[in-house]
Image (cartoon, grey):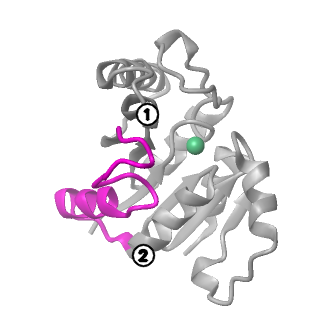
Amino acid sequence: MNRAVFLDRDGTLIAEKNYLHRPEEVEIFPGAGAALHHLAAAGFKLIIVTNQSGIGRGYFTLADAENVNRHLCAEFVREGVHFEKIYIAPEAPDQPSRGRKPSPQFLFDARDELGLDLAQSYMIGDKPIDLECGWNAGVKKSILVRTGYGLESESALKGKEFTDTNTRPMIVNDLAGAANWILEQK
Ligand SMILES: [Mg+2]
């Protein structure tokens, strides 16, 4: 069975910009390409799972979001990094949605399509909903990065008690930190 690393997009792979929807606004975090390259070399499939409520709110279109993703993929390809799949949840928070995080639905879809072992896979993101998405899907670990909204998320999580070690988030500075940590696990 295959293992995967599920990745949030905004604030995790690229700089968080309010409702980013233009390719020229894409700013890949330094070191992100190398980090993903290491994960792929270790056999992890790379899958992006992104909530794009700006579509549901009418701020931009699905085509805009896909354009941004195409540009992002082209940039990462230059570093030898290929994403297996990109899942977009276009709904606003108050709209019914099949896959909007924290729903684990897209992770289940990817499991079925790509033959993934979710218990040996990871989720990386900058918001509590990213962590919850991973927990809901039963991944091995949800990892919080301190980029994007990560610092705010870290303080929001401070008061919480995680009695179950499986739902205690690993907190690292950035994507490179997350990749290094994953590669140290058995
Ligand atoms: Mg994010």
**Which quadrant of the structure image shows residue 155?**
bottom right
Per the image, the residue denoted by label 1 is 81
| Label 2: few (<14), some (14–19) or many (≥20) C-alpha neighbours in 10 Å | many
Residue 115 is covered by the magenta coloring: yes
Q: Earlier in the sequence, mark 1 or mark 2?
A: 1
Which SS class for mark 2? loop
**Label 2 sits on what residue type?**
Gly
Which SS class for mark 1? loop
Residue at the spot 44% in from the left edge and 53% down from the top edge: 6
**Which quadrant of the picture is home to ligand 1?**
top right
Q: Residue furthest bottom?
A: 163
Whether residue 139 is visible to the viewer of this picture, yes or no, is: no
The segment highlighted magenta reads: 90-118
**Label 1 sits on what residue type?**
Val
Q: Position of residue 71 (x, y in %)?
A: 42, 17
Q: Residue furthest front?
A: 94
Residue at the spot 18% in from the left edge and 57% down from the top edge: 113
Per the image, the residue denoted by label 2 is 138
Q: Nearer the viewer, mark 1 or mark 2?
A: 2
Cα–Cα gap, marks 1 and 2: 26 Å
Question: Residue 102: which disc?
Answer: none
| Label 1: few (<14), some (14–19) or many (≥20) C-alpha neighbours in 10 Å | many
Q: Nearer the viewer, residue 112 or 148?
A: 148
Residue at the spot 50% in from the left edge and 59% down from the top edge: 123
In the rendered view of the protein, which quadrant contains the N terminus?
A: bottom left
Q: Is residue 77 left or right of residue 178?
A: left
